[in-house]
Image (cartoon, helix red, strand yellow):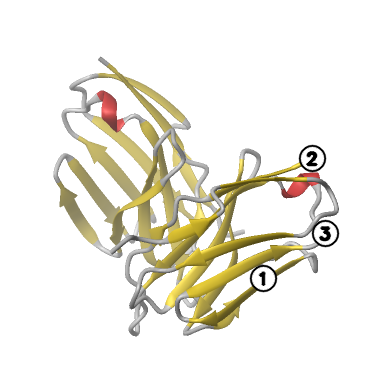
Amino acid sequence: DAGVIQSPRHEVTEMGQEVTLRCKPISGHNSLFWYRQTMMRGLELLIYFNNNVPIDDSGMPEDRFSAKMPNASFSTLKIQPSEPRDSAVYFCASSLYRGRFYEQYFGPGTRLTVT
Amino acid sequence: KNEVEQSPQNLTAQEGEFITINCSYSVGISALHWLQQHPGGGIVSLFMLSSGKKKHGRLIATINIQEKHSSLHITASHPRDSAVYICAVRWEGSQGNLIFGKGTKLSVKP
């Protein structure tokens, strides 16, 4: 298996622009997580899907952030409009859930820079 | 407040040394994860445990549920073990989200 795939790996954009990050989870996994990592706050959960349904989005910073999972093999995280404080590394991870959670597998991350 | 505390924040060791990284948390958990993040940024899950001890190669993870404490040990450390080690917990009754410690930056000198 190719593991969790994220694109793009790097994104540089100007403040106010829309940014879309993409994630393809490991085939067969039914849970997907979006995380953000910054120097100040470390790793934080943004949103978590189970069977394509958002379960916990309490970590989504504000209305500028939205996430979708239209099917089991694809998810997007969108920031509109982007701001310099959104600069971070965004990780997607997937896992199997069958009454309990199994290990999470992380993608390589997308390094976002908003100027 | 639900917190995950790691110690030390930074650790420098000589090749071959035995290394211990500690993690403590404040409330009941259903699982604890140890993650490794290399300088390139990729994150790898090392262990997921809810009781006892797990071993994988030179890595050993232990957890004491009563004391709310876990340790990650590295035997015969090697420069390639240099990375940030992150402890993360899933609280009892949570929907699935992990709460992360700040990480321990390990540097192993040859």
Residue A50 vs A57, above or below: the answer is below
Q: Which residue is mark 2?
A: A115
Q: Which residue is mark 1?
A: A58
Q: Is residue B97 visible in the rendered structure shown here?
A: no
Residue A80 appears left or right of B77: right
Q: Disc 1 residue type?
A: Ser
Q: How far from the left and from the top, in percent, is residue B28?
A: 44, 67
Q: Which residue is mark 3?
A: A81
Asked if badges 2 and 3 are on one and the same chain, I answer yes
Q: At x 44% / y 36%, what residue is drawn?
A: B40
Circle 2 — which element? loop
Residue A80 appears left or right of B43: right
Residue B95 vs B32, above or below: the answer is below
Circle 1 — which element? loop
Q: Chain of mark 1?
A: A
Could you give the CA–CA distance between mark 2 and mark 3, rounded to whole angstroms?
A: 12 Å
Q: Residue furthest right?
A: A16
